[in-house]
Image: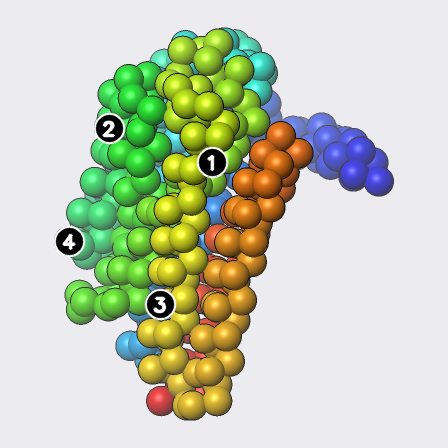
Amino acid sequence: MDRYRINRRHRFIERVIHPLVGNFVIDFLKMTKPRVWVFLLITGIAGEVFSLSILRSLDILGFIYVTIFIALGLMGAESVSNYFDLSIDKKMKRTMNRPLPSGKMRPEVALYGGIILVGVTLIMSWFRSLWSFAFMATGIFDYTIIYSLISKKRTSWNIVLGAYSGGAPLLAGFYAFSSSFSIIAVLMFLTIFIWTPLHIWSLSIKYREDYAAASVPMLPVTRSTKESMRILFPFALLAAFVTVLTGYEFMAYFKLYVGIAVFLLYLALAISLLMSYFRALSDPDRNIMKLFASTNMFIGIFFVLIALFSLLIPFIGV
């Protein structure tokens, strides 16, 4: 069934999308890793929705404007990062068929195209909010320079150094509309920051040979699986703890029983993440990809709940 759906999707792309936009646009979009930036865009949108909700504002044009520049910034950062990662991607089986390492896309197109997108983002964010500009600029710098260019090939803690960039779009979205401090915005940022190593290192355990072949010292390449799983534990515990704190802080925006329901949902989410970790710990070879899938589901549900509860604040919030 899954194979049928994949084949049907490929046929749709070949017959409908390609004639409309051309191979170049499709290859460029693929190069920007849409699965990655769409997720980060969702976190940015969650930040926007939460900010607008607590302000009781319906700024639709502003929402569209901010969403556009966050999306362009994410695409630009991924494009520049792919240029820096070209030598790595050519050596890894998981990545060698991407547009850049496979030769479908020229490296200079990735670099200059990405720089143009980043430039547009910075200009747009500058005219919207100084704080939003600051978070987009530092997030892009962290991902492209600190992570991709400097630390990815030099230290097994590279993903921790690059984790800030994952939370930057969220803060850019929130502070595009507000200049006030928000503990929930900070907790959302911390969730992404802590979740990122847990998510990436669980995948790296599965593909450690790929990373080793490309001389990328991800944690599972430099440590045994047993050691790597031990190091993952505090990240799983902290992610669960911050999730519970987020639910607790959200209670203040609703009446008692609704607030309790919100808290219990986040508590259940935190418990499910810990259970996934311990299941993987018991048998990493069989269950590590289940942990990876669980981290995907965890962060998706986390931010969908943020957006849904935020939308409810103007109607049933206190």
Nearer the camera: disc 2 or disc 3: 3
Q: Mark 4 points at which residue?
A: 130
**Callouts 2 and 4 close, C-beta under 8 Å:** no
Name the side, left or right, on which 113 lies relative to 211.
left
Amino acid type shown at disc 1 = Met
- Work out whether mark 2 precedes mark 4 in sequence or the reverse, and give the earlier one: 4
Q: Residue at x 48, y 68 (%)?
A: 267
Amino acid type shown at disc 4 = Leu
- Measure how far apart labels 4 and 1 are at the Cα level: 40 Å
Give coordinates of residue 243: x percent, y percent.
41, 62
- Measure how far apart labels 1 and 3 are at the Cα level: 24 Å
**Callouts 4 and 1 close, C-beta under 8 Å:** no
Q: Where 295 sits versus 36, above or below?
A: below
- Measure how far apart labels 2 and 3 are at the Cα level: 30 Å
- Work out whether mark 1 precedes mark 3 in sequence or the reverse, and give the earlier one: 1
Give coordinates of residue 41: x percent, y percent.
42, 49
Label drawn at residue 146 = 2
Quarter-wise, where is residue 65 in the image? bottom left
- Work out whether mark 1 precedes mark 2 in sequence or the reverse, and give the earlier one: 2
- Measure how far apart labels 3 and 4 are at the Cα level: 29 Å
Query: Label 2: few (<14), some or many (≥20) within 10 Å?
Result: some
Q: Where 142 sits versus 304, above or below?
A: above
Give coordinates of residue 273: x percent, y percent.
52, 54
Nearer the camera: disc 2 or disc 4: 2
Amino acid type shown at disc 3 = Leu
Residue nearest the viewer, comparing 48 with 216: 216
Q: Mark 3 points at which residue?
A: 245
Q: In which quarter of the image is the C terminus?
A: bottom left
Q: Which residue is drawn at 17% across and 54% down?
A: 131
Quarter-wise, where is residue 117 in the image? top left
- Work out whether mark 4 precedes mark 1 in sequence or the reverse, and give the earlier one: 4
